Amino acid sequence: MLNQIEQYLLENHPFQDPGLNREKLAKALQISERAIANAIKENKGMTVVEYINAARLDYCRHLLSSPHPIVLKEIAEESGFGTPRTFQRQFRDKYGMTPSQYRKIILEQEGRG
């Protein structure tokens, strides 16, 4: 079941909707909310909200690595974070650096900085 959830997130990017929650995910996948929550908790040790935010942050990292720089506000919106501030706080909490610092490191590693 987790594979089905992951595939859906990767292919459809439902996390771009700031309102995505357990109920909407369950409806889209036609799986009970409880089954989704249990699958994520058992396999990833996260709540559904934490899992959705992790998918958003992974997508943010992809956008930050783009050779065509995107404004942080646009990355936050494109990734489904309600505000740039929420995006920056969650990014810093997970990766220990700001999105700008991450982008700078990536650009330097790729010789674009």
Image (tube, helix red, strand yellow):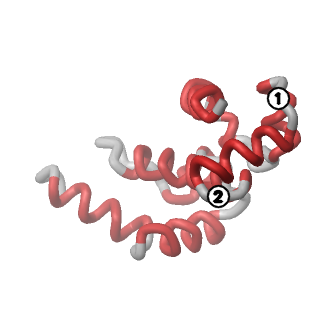
Element under disc 2: loop
Which disc, if any, is residue 46? Answer: 2
Q: Nearer the viewer, residue 57 or 70?
A: 57
Tell me the residue at 85%/43% (across/down). Answer: 34
Query: How far across and down, in percent of the image, does residue 50 sit?
Result: 66, 58
Q: What kind of residue is marked 2?
A: Met
Residue 26 x, y percent position in the rendering = 83, 34
Query: Residue at point 55% right, 69% down?
Result: 88
How far apart are the two marked residues, 2 and 1, measured between alpha carbons? Answer: 18 Å
- Locate residue 104: give its quadrant: bottom left
User: Callout 2: few (<14), some (14-19), or many (20+) C-alpha neighbours within 10 Å?
Assistant: some
Apparent side of residue 63 relative to residue 37 in the rendered image (left or right): left
Q: Which mark is residue 113?
A: none
Expressed as whole percent of the image width and height from the top left, the position of residue 107 reads: 22, 56
Q: Residue furthest left?
A: 111
* Tag 1 residue: 31
- Quadrant of the rendered image containing residue 30: top right
Q: Is residue 69 left or right of residue 107?
A: right
The quarter in which the C terminus is drawn is bottom left
Q: Is residue 43 above or below residue 90?
A: above
Q: Residue at x 58, y 52 (%)?
A: 44
Looking at the picture, does residue 13 appear above or below residue 15?
Answer: above
**Of label 2 and label 1, which has the lower sequence position?**
1
Residue 86 location, quadrant? bottom right
Give the structural element (helix, strand or loop) at label 1.
loop
Q: Residues within 10 Å of mark 1 (few under 14, many from 20)?
A: some
Circle 1: residue type: Ile
Percent position (x, y) of residue 39? 69, 42
